[in-house]
Amino acid sequence: MIARLARFKRLWMLLGILILPWVVEGLLGRGWVRILDFALLSVLLAIGLNIVVGYAGLLDLGFIAFFGVGAYAYALLASPQFGVHWPLWAILPTGVLVAASFGVALGWPTLGLRGDYLAIVTMGFGEIIRVFLNNLTAPINITNGPQGITMIDALHLGGWSFARPHRVWGIPLPALVGTFYLFLLFVLLALFLSRRLEYSRIGRAWMAIREDEIAAASMGLDTRRLKLLAYALGAAFGGVSGGLFAGFQGFVSPESFTLQESVMILCMVVLGGMGNLSGVVVGALLLAFLPEVLRPLGDWQQHWFHHVLVDPSTLRLLLFGIALVILMRWRPEGLLPSRARAREWHTS
């Protein structure tokens, strides 16, 4: 009976997710559906970072670099930059392999580092990638420098382009709604793979390393190989998200892959609850929508005080920071922490 109720609940939840873009478009407008699409990409990124930080316990402040690598892999293989226009089914696996290779390149020299030292090195790695993307213009113009790459091919599978509206069984399907379903498919696949990893031997080995690396090594675990695997798999998720971002946006530039974006992704994982997939999803969605909810602050000030007292962008960051500080003070384990992490915080 309980199992049937659980299945019934999951079915209704899935139905609610499927009709969500239609409800959002009807109530808030098409612009919010676009924000919803970007929020799903943030969820995909947070799932990847959760493998590195939540499962293996490796603090990574340069995760946005893998997002950038995936985005530029898509841009270079599906744009007039080199006159190459590969299909989606070929570009995404290529981006995954390239991003995973960069993940191993990051992990290899950091195997002996922990804590603050690891954070500094990963932060430097993220900045190195951004600087390379900004300057790979000579002797061969690869990335087009600060101008970025434009006219990137839209996401498409065969003759189905996700940049155009379609009709399915006589029902009009807007482009943004179709893109939502594509991104949702990748998020569900990422959740499934991440959940399987969590309960596998590899996942339990990661958690052993997270709790005590020395004890894990003394039990015979190959901690070097396991940490490299965590970096590679986390980077692979970032590469997929970056490729989808490039195809959706139609334009990429190095300014989209700054340290601030890396910190934001880490906040999503920490806020939601490291190591718990449900918490990571909630944290990613919350931090993806919160800046947009606070965007009308300038209009509110104009309405209440008849002039703008504080610059809206500054006030948004201030309120956002205050909210994070309050939450971390009263619920440091995150909104939906894993049971083990919750016990750690409340029994210490």
Image: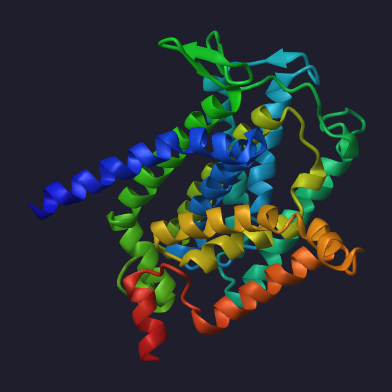
**What residue appears at the point 46 percent right and 52 percent down from the top-left corner?**
229
The answer to whether residue 199 is left or right of residue 336 is: left
Q: Position of residue 173 (x, y in %)?
A: 52, 19
Quadrant in the rendering for residue 160: top right
Q: How many marks?
A: 0
**What residue appears at the point 82 percent right and 30 percent down from the top-left corner?**
142
Q: Nearer the viewer, residue 226 or 173?
A: 173
Q: Is residue 264 visible?
A: yes
Q: Residue furthest left?
A: 1
Q: Nearer the viewer, residue 162 or 77?
A: 162
In the image, residue 212 above or below residue 82: below
The answer to whether residue 103 is left or right of residue 182 is: right
Q: Position of residue 264 (x, y in %)?
A: 65, 60
Q: Nearer the viewer, residue 218 or 94?
A: 94
**What residue appears at the point 70 percent right and 32 percent down from the top-left corner?**
249
Q: Position of residue 109 (x, y in %)?
A: 63, 60
Quadrant in the rendering for residue 190: top left
**What residue appears at the point 46 percent right and 64 percent down from the top-left corner?**
54
Q: Nearer the viewer, residue 88 or 206?
A: 88
Colour convention: rainbow
Q: Is residue 238 visible?
A: no
The answer to whether residue 131 is left or right of residue 259 is: right
In the image, residue 11 above or below residue 200: above
The answer to whether residue 253 is left or right of residue 8 is: right
Q: Position of residue 267 (x, y in %)?
A: 60, 65
Q: Quadrant of the C terminus?
A: bottom left
